[in-house]
Image (cartoon, rainbow, N blue to C red):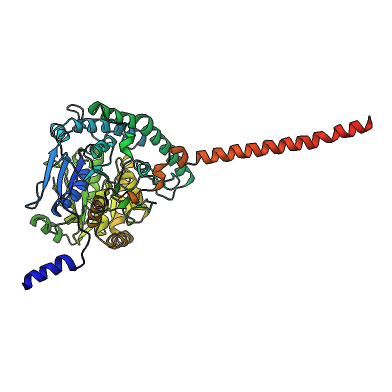
Amino acid sequence: MCRGLVLFLCLFLVPCGPIVECAKILGVFPFPSKSHYAMGNSLLKELAIRGHEVTMIAAFEETSLPPNVSYRTLKVNIDLNEGNKKINFFEQDMSNPYLITFFLNWAGSKITNGTFNAPEVQKLLRSREKFDAVIMDQFTDDSFAYFAHHFGANQILLLTTCANSWVNPLVANPAPPSVNPELLLEFSSSMTFLERLKNTVFYIFSELNRQLYFFPKQNEVIRTNFPKARPLYDYLYNVSLILMNAHESFNDPLALVPVMKNVGGMHVSPSGKLPSDLRKFMDEAKEGVVYFSMGSNLKSKDLPPRIRGSILKVFAKLDVKVLWKWEDETLPGQPGNVKLSKWLPQQEILGHPNLKVFITHGGLLSTIEAVHYGVPLLTLPVYGDQKLNAATAQQKGYAINIPFADFEEGKFEQALNELLRNPKYKQNAAIRSKLFHDRPMKPLDEAVYWVEYVIRHRGAEHLRVAALKLSWYQYILLDVFGFILVALSIVVYILRMILMKVCCGKPDKVKSKIN
């Protein structure tokens, strides 16, 4: 009797947070990049742990799921390499943002077509399943907006970056190019005149590319696979929520409409445990450790021999130890203070007190993890948003940036010694780390909250700004300016007629009097 009363009080009288019933959620993350998958998987896995039924379309597969969670993976294999020739980003000119745009055009068509035609995805599309939400990786794959329509679901976008011109128009987020740097450029929000000029020109180019080439190609993907589908634009702007891998601790603050939420750092989940050999190596490094990794997509073993040789020469002069993520069996000319491994637990290494500097490609996940632990960076950005991330980190005082295209042995040695000897970089990194952690709730908890919020409120239409209901010419006030111009023209015309009558009428009267 008493136990029943207690249970009744707990269930019905004790205040609790909003309850969401088990929802069916589809994740769409087929881009063959570990960093994109890591972002999506961290959220989808957590949603499954919290009782939701998750289906994941992905290029990778989760292998460490807790028991009794509903998480199935529909694996797709899309190879962006042409035949036996693998893409080597170190050798190709990926520093040019215009060339990267053309590459992303091609990659987007290949990935979206490949995903829609994957046998497991075809089977899912033919099924009568329904989902409450579709969470998709927003990256060169706008035709995936059809998934939300097909399954009668709320559309949620997950960005691996900050707010940018790829998604701002989808939710009518105000983002003038005067203060919003383009993602493929290396400018901060505080741009010089020349930088604003370059940013504006690239913004115009990017928008023309999207409207005149990329969107028509993505529309073609939908029409090819779904002949009865409506045009892409009917699906593209039906966005309930955008979750972004951003935060003011490592990004410049940007204006955001209510459906856009910064949840940067939600992928950070260290185990706190280092393998015994690594723990011994780092514990005994009393002078400190430098950690070197070029991420999951770039491979250190593919570095040009000249640059690899220069890096080894600099490492050999250091008093500190070096831990290098090296994907080959051997490293010719390996110094005695350098330890190699094909895989390294990055978050646990960054959290070790003896770590002094992280040499990185400037990928955003790596940058965030460094900020989480307050570790200074030496960045060697190669392509994509790496240049922007690296430039922002340097501008905020916790990094030195050497674009890979500008690599020189002397620059590299000087920068590394400066980071090791000058305490200001560590101090600035500690400030950023403090800002990163000072939040009302953890980023993963916030991301889950907003996903459940959108499902709870059936798309959260009340968060969408009124600008989405306006046509493009209404949004930029072209009709208003047109009306004002016509009105002013009429007023000027009337005034001109009156002046002409007044000025031209007097001489006639005078002439008639003389006659």
Q: Whole-percent x and y of residue 116?
A: 20, 32
- 214 sits to left or right of 471: left
Identified at 14% across, 68% down, the residue is: 10
Percent coordinates x, y for residue 295 in the rendering: 21, 45
Q: Quadrant of the N terminus?
A: bottom left
Q: Is residue 59 left or right of residue 398?
A: left
* Residue found at x 80% / y 33%: 504
Q: Residue furthest bottom?
A: 2
Question: Image quadrant of residue 227?
Answer: top left
* On-image quarter of the C terminus: top right
Query: In this view of the protein, can residue 459 be seen by the observer?
Result: yes
Q: Nearer the viewer, residue 142 or 6?
A: 6
Please say if 82 is above or below 2: above
- Can you give x and y, in whole percent of width and height, for residue 165 in the image? 37, 42
Name the quadrant containing residue 372: bottom left
Quarter occupied by residue 299: top left
Seen in the picture, residue 266 relative to 215 is either above or below; the reply is below
